[in-house]
Image (cartoon, rainbow, N blue to C red):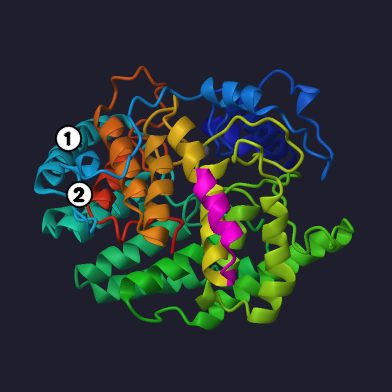
Amino acid sequence: MLRMRTRTTAVCFAVRRTVCLLQELAGGGRCTPGRAPLPRSVPLLFRRSLFAEPLRTATRMAAHSMASRALRNPYRDYDGSAACSQGLFDQHGRLTAEFVGRLRSKISELLFHMENGLKSADPRDCSSYTGWAGIALLYLHLHSVFGESSFLQRALDYVTRSLQCLTRRTVTFLCGDAGPLAVAAVVHRRLGMSQEAEECVSRLIKYHQGVVKGSGNLPDELLYGRVGYLYSLVFVNQQFGEEKIPMQYIQQICEAVLASGEGLSGKLHKQAQSPLLFQWYQEYYVGAAHGLAGIYYYLMQPDLGVGGDRLQRLVRPSVDYVRQLKFPSGNYPPCIGDSRDLLVHWCHGAPGVIYMLLQAYKVFGTDGYLADALQCGEVVWQWGLLQKGYGLCHGAAGNAYTFLALYRATRDPRHLYRACMFADWCMDYGIHGCRTPDTPFSLFEGMAGTIYFLADLMQPHKAKFPAFEI
Ligand SMILES: [Zn+2]
């Protein structure tokens, strides 16, 4: 894996990225580049033309395809009766002591397994996505939820390990050095180590100019691009509870993202359809991890400086362009022009697009956005228990955040109930015959992510998809 990394070129990444998504579509692989094994050849079937009219696959066919990647949802749906949520939560959405007890005990059990499993993890993976910073972020979260100081100490141990093996190449929260630095800043601050915290913040800010300029052909998406760095700055400010990093820095990144999106749309003469457009390795991704929906989610945040005129003129029609890519099932394609309705993941599909839709509903107030978001919920309820397992990026825990987002937006107990059912499924960790991820104990692919979700469910009004939602 490391050998492959050192040989990597931009072109190679592009091929590998395509291969990676092909593997996703084939039911295997993962959604981060630089890790998927190279095949002997890249099939041509994946070639698409931008803005090609999506083939409207028959719903039955689509359902069949999604079904091949999901396990049957064994739970009966919420019926509105008190009996349905009995033993889970009360009318105010407070979890019952009994259910909290189950969650707590499963969290302890899984933490024990995770710690054991991490003994054989890649010692040089610093990242939040699959490496040490992700484990540190989990412990930081557990400290927030449970208030136990031992969790904060563990967070310090892991983030220290992460800082010792930074990529010195990637700048984002999830896959680069900004994640370890931002998490370290917060851990140090909570421990009262203010000098160390300041040092981490100043190291984090040093990347700012390069990100604004787009040095090294920096993309705009979440995992490897500008908004992935932007998240780190917002994370620090939220966790510090003050404007530790001036808003001006964050706004400058948004400006650069807007300019990049306008530039590409103009270059392709697509302003009338989508005034903003973004690509990553020559593909027009749609989902939260690499695509349009993830970027627009940030551009619609009221505090990040994209004013009313540009929200209406640039962002809103671009959001509406993504909306019309919706399949008859209610799910979304991984890329523009891809007609295969297969993936129900946070990284590709409805479980990631929903955050854009709910934010659009909040900002623009049009019911259609909420209706589409509710449809995402239906897709996830039906097809969201994945053969890929229990992780955040492409697993049941990540998909369950769909329900928590809907619950926060609507306060409809149906969504909290569904989140509890997905948690119940996750608590039977390992018994469903799911595939084992490449990094089985990591935050975004493995057990750490499942634990993060189970802990977040204990405070459903505050729950947020980690390293993404703000
Ligand atoms: Zn994924």
| Residue 298 lies within the magenta run | no
> Vertical placement of 30 versus 80: above or below?
above
Circles 1 and 2 in contact, beta carbons < 8 Å? no
- Residue drawn at x 59%, y 38% is 33
- Residue drawn at x 12%, y 57% is 148
The residue closer to the viewer here, 366 or 104, is 366
> Would you identify the image quadrant in which residue 91 lies?
bottom left
The secondary structure type at the circle numbered 1 is helix
| Residue 372 lies within the magenta run | yes
Please provide the residue range marked out in magenta.
364-376
Q: Residues within 10 Å of mark 2 (few under 14, many from 20)?
A: many
Gap between marks 1 and 2 measured at Cα: 27 Å
The answer to whether one can see residue 37 in this image is no
What residue sits right under mark 2 in the picture? 89
Tell me the tag on residue 338.
none
Residue type, mark 2 in image: Phe
Q: What x and y, as percent, mark residue 85?
A: 23, 43
Q: What x and y, as percent, mark residue 30?
A: 53, 32
Query: Relative to 373, is 309 on the left or the right?
Result: right
Q: What x and y, as percent, mark residue 200?
A: 38, 68
The residue closer to the viewer here, 351 or 430, is 351
Query: Relative to 65, is 235 on the left or the right?
Result: left
> Vertical placement of 94 versus 129: above or below?
below
The answer to whether one can see residue 46 in this image is yes
The secondary structure type at the circle numbered 2 is loop
The residue closer to the viewer here, 104 or 22, is 104
Task: Tell me which numbered mark, 1 or 2, is placed earlier along the sequence.
Answer: 2
Tell me the tag on residue 112.
1
